Amino acid sequence: MDEKLVNSLYKKAVGYTVTEKTMEYSPDGEVVKKKVTQKHFPPDISALKAYLELISSEEDYESMTDEELEREKERLLKELEEIKNGTDQT
């Protein structure tokens, strides 16, 4: 599975903020006006559903023991935290 796709889907599922920079230049090429804004994109339910289906389709949780489910839970939580930390830096 393409990691970039999964990370993008996760980012859209939990919401994200983008910093936009706009600059106005004078005819001689100097910056006259600089505007920095942040645009927030709220969580998307469709992306969340798709992300959860994508993750759950990789494993058959019904046949797992309690110990296996606990290990899988910890693995998924760790993976989500890594993805979150990676997307916070962009």
Image (tube, grey):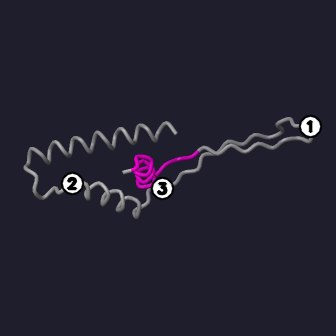
Q: Which mark is residue 42?
A: 3
Residue occupied by mark 2: 59
Tell whether label 1 touches label 2 (CB within 8 Å): no
Residue lying furthest right in this view?
Answer: 28
- Type of residue at label 1? Asp
**Which sits earlier in the primary sequence, circle 3 or circle 2?**
3
The image shows residue 58 at horizontal and vertical percentages of 25, 54
- Type of residue at label 2? Glu
Main SS class of the magenta portion in the image: helix
Residue occupied by mark 1: 28
Between marks 3 and 2 in the image, the one whose residue lies nearer the viewer: 2
Residue at image location 45% in from the left, 51% down from the top: 8
Tell whether label 2 touches label 3 (CB within 8 Å): no
Residue at image location 10% in from the left, 56% down from the top: 63
**Which sits earlier in the primary sequence, circle 2 or circle 1?**
1
The image shows residue 13 at horizontal and vertical percentages of 41, 55
Residue bounds of the magenta highlight: 2-18
